[in-house]
Image: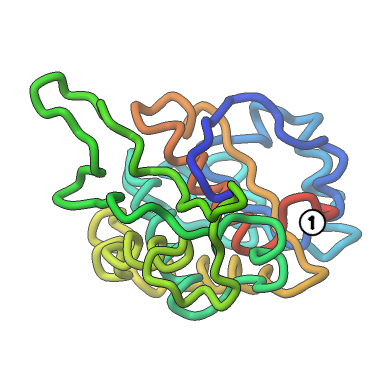
Amino acid sequence: SLAPTYGRGAMTNHWSDIANANLVLVMGGNAAEAHPCGFKWVTEAKAHNKARLIVVDPRFTRTASVADYYAPIRTGTDIAFMGGLINYLLSNDKIQHEYVRNYTDVSFIVKENYGFEDGLFSGYDEAKRVYADKSGWGYELGEDGYAKVDPTLQHPRCVFQLMKQHYSRYTPELASMTCGMPQDAMMKVWEEIASCSVPGKTMTILYALGWTQHSIGAQIIRSAAMVQLLLGNVGMPG
């Protein structure tokens, strides 16, 4: 599902499976130094699977020192980088259509009273500073009780179109300015990630407390999950 999830600092897959990856993206962590035994599987992927290692980090770490490509980023701006990446994948049709149609909620139609304006979703109580009414965040249901879907992904309120609309604000220019990363460096990373949208090619993402221990840590990790779902990588070797 591309619906809201919660991020955790724990492992979400086996270390050894990283050996099957074609691309390894490290953000918010320094696995070579913090998890040297686990990082062995990244070196296995590079040696035996010709995997590429990309590190996006404010510091030039020991992980970055063995990367195929290192891109410095301004501290605390990872969410803008991920937002720009999602916009790039959607705008350039770098998603695995068969996968997202069958295994995510991109075709589900969201209720009419759902909205997002001036940085806030519908149902916000300004006095209490909480989302008091989340009833509009659900799916529109048919007479059979199941969510209505649009297999063509063209309905203006299907999850796919709402995602495109929401992430359109994360332009390469805005992401570059926010992250302090030149556009050419950012595009190089995004293009390599987008190459994993084809069947049989997968990326794995290594993150740690550099993602989880932000006030928006759950949202950063959710964005990574959405990227992997759009690429069709979840549940695949690597």
Q: Closer to the camera, 226 or 73?
A: 226
Q: Residues within 10 Å of mark 1 (few under 14, many from 20)?
A: many
The correct choice, above or below, for 61 with respect to 227 in the image is: above
Residue drawn where x is 17% and y is 24% of the image: 129
Q: Closer to the camera, 172 or 179?
A: 172
Residue drawn where x is 53% and y is 36% of the image: 5
Residue drawn where x is 21% and y is 43% of the image: 120
- Secondary structure, mark 1, is loop
The correct choice, above or below, for 132 with respect to 178 in the image is: above
Give residue 20's quadrant in the image: bottom right
- The colouring scheme, among rainbow, by chain, secondary structure or one colour, is rainbow
- Tell me where residue 133 appears, x and y as whole percent: 28, 31
Name, please, the residue furthest toward the top: 128
Name, please, the residue furthest toward the front: 143
The correct choice, above or below, for 220 with respect to 48 in the image is: above
Q: Closer to the camera, 72 or 98?
A: 98
Q: Closer to the camera, 59 or 111?
A: 111
- Tell me where residue 161 appears, x and y as whole percent: 41, 68
Name, please, the residue furthest toward the left: 127
Residue drawn where x is 25% and y is 44% of the image: 121
How many numbered dots are placed on residues in this image? Answer: 1
- Mark 1 — residue? 21
Callout 1, which amino acid? Ala
Seen in the image, is 39 located left or right of residue 120? right
Q: Is residue 121 visible?
A: yes
Seen in the image, is 196 located left or right of residue 157? right
- Tell me where residue 143 appears, x and y as whole percent: 55, 53
- Tell me where residue 85 appears, x and y as whole percent: 45, 63
Q: Is residue 75 visible?
A: no
